[in-house]
Amino acid sequence: MKRLKTRFDERLRVMALALLVSCSSTPLWAQGLKDAYKDYFMIGVAVNQRNVTNASQSALVKQEFNSMTAENDMKPEPTEPREGEFNWESADRIANFARQNGIKLRGHCLMWHSQIGKWMYEDNPTKEVFFKRMRNHIHTIVNRYKDVIYCWDVVNEAITDDRNASDPYRQSPLYKIAGDEFIAKAFEYAREADPKALLFYNDYNECDPVKSKRIFEMVKKMKAAGVPIDGIGMQGHYNIYGPTEKEVDDAIKLYKQVVNHIHVTELDIRINEEMGGQLRFSREGQTVSDSIKQHLADQYARVFRVFRNHKDVVKCVTFWNLSDRDSWLGARNYPLPFDTEYKPKLAYEYIKDMTAPKWDMPKKPARPKRNNRGGAQAERPPFNPDLAFPENPNIKEDFKPSVKNQPGQQYPQVNSQGYVRFRVELPEAKSVVVSLGLGGRGGTKLHKTYDGSWVGTTEGPMDEGFHYYHLTVDGGVVNDPGAMNYFGSTRWESGIEIPAHDQDFYAVKNVPHGNVQQVLFWSESTKTTRRAFVYTPPKYGKNKKQKYPVLYLQHGWGEDETAWSNQGHANLIMDNLIAEGKIEPFIIVMTYGMTNEVRFGGLRQFTAEAFEKVLVDELVPYIDANFQTRADKDHRAMAGLSMGGFETKLITLRRPEVFGYYGLMSGGQYAPTDIKDKKQVKLIFQSCGSKENPDGIKKSTEALKAAGHNAVGYVSEGTAHEFLTWRRSLKELAQLLFKK
């Protein structure tokens, strides 16, 4: 798809147009569409009561159009709701407006199965009675307005849309009473009432090859029988995906074989896939991207180009409503040349200036899946990202579903730049905000789009790696139904992965894999059964005599024992390092560190003594008793991230006889004075992200080295207090542990 020109370019174009206007003898701003098309055909509009009584709206009608149609006020039911009882108030107001302003008036419509009083057919009358009622209605209304109405849509929508139907006619109550004779009679009665008026058959989907042929054959048959059909009304309820120029051209060429007058009677163009009489969703407003505005303008340009090419037979083109505010389709469909504020759109300019389209037609979105009963799963139109997300030239449109999504879910999505795109179906919601994206500035605010879903894209790219997030819907916190959940912030949160440039070290590869198993152990100190997850290397258990070192690895505040395997991919990091021969295999034990019992503000009082009893006095003996471990200090390490690092520091310093290797990941630093005996520790590992406190890690590590300790400092480039920092840290630490 060709890219839209920048808004700056558009401004230049508008400025150039304004300059042309200023140099013209007749200012273009004072000209309407009717003036631009005076050498082609009349330009009409369907109006309601507000349009002809509101001063600014009626002025717009007078400036732009030289033909009008009453949208609803002249249909059978509004004019004769009960037999013999006519209501002329609204119809008269529109007719008088046309008379007073010299605007021609189209009559719409005399016979239509939809908006017709049931009195005409509900008692199952004979054809004779039915025809008598028809004639009286038609004669009465046609005679009342014959001085101002120059043509009538006599019969509306009598041909079926069912491509497989053997009978080409819609099986309406009117047809069931009298067959296609009701069509012939309606035209006969209209001609009797006004011999001068042009009489039209009017229908939608008129460019569909099957339906257009049916319309053609019906009109041809009727005219051969002497029925006074003067023209065919092509309603023109189109969309940005169709019809093509060729399809419109073919339809007109077909119809002009049997009539000399073709009117486009109800033109609007939707930005979704629906066409014709379809309308299945809410009519509220939406944000429309620049690309969609361009597609709308281009489609109007295409169909008007065809209409101009057939000016010999196309005599009038009527827009079905004055603006998006008035449209039966609603603002979400963005269907007309004037917006909800009655301001001209880009489409208006393309129509008026007879501008050629810039882009090719967009591809239709995929059809919705069918349910087991053969029906559509939803009444809303298929979701189309091109319609939902405003165009941003800075964002690459190469979004893919996040690897952390629920099975089969397409959103959230991540692009190659690290932007995240969200979509959630919450049609009743008033506000949806994603915590991810803007940090302290409030997250990513989603907007409601045409299909009832909420969509949005982060303002900027996210850091590489894993992130927690949630939705705030009308003030309540919920998870994203499209994403998998991970325990963090003391609750199950949605998770998303921004692919890292170095993600290969924790990728799932075709290498031997270890096992992560859940174990339950009794804690006498807490009088509870507690849980731990234990990683054992790929060949564990094959040699019953082989013993393995153990790393006790702790999570951070708000997380639990699932964090290091789910969010941290500790098992995959180990599998890959072992396969590459970079480390000797060892066991990792991950248990709940009781850190969530510490609230903000209470860190000074936190001693980790309760957890120390669970870990050192209960879990370590359990692991040594049930796994093939090397049960001594020189083959036992403890490390943790964030608050788990703080726990690690407290416990290793108090119990130097238990652990020989220490690791703090974004969890503070050791000072030389913390270590009473240089021989008590084999390795001190300290790390953080480059967006945290890299200087603190550097200074502490240098001080430890100067004091004679085996200390290693590591800084993860480009990351903050997040799991990519800790994944990288584990990779580095693992290669330093248990060296012979």
Image (spheres, rainbow, N blue to C red):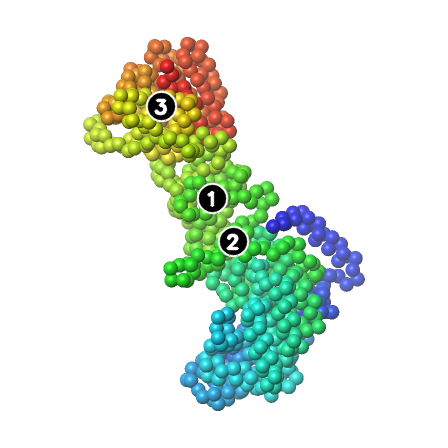
Residue 499, compared with residue 136, is above or below; it is: above
Residue on which disc 3 sits? 585
Residue displayed at 68% across by 73% down:
313
The reply to whether residue 494 is in sight is: yes
How far apart, in angstroms, are the residues tagged by discs 3 and 2? 50 Å
Marks 2 and 1, the one that precedes in the sequence: 2
How far apart, in angstroms, are the residues tagged by discs 2 and 1? 15 Å
The circle drawn on residue 401 is 1
Label 2 crowding class (10 Å Cα cut-off): few <14, some 14-19, many 20+?
some
In front: label 3 or label 1: 3
The circle drawn on residue 384 is 2
Residue displayed at 57% across by 42% down:
395
Helix, strand or loop at label 2? It is loop
In the image: residue 312, left or right of residue 205: right
Residue displayed at 43% across by 25% down:
580
Residue displayed at 44% across by 10% down:
706
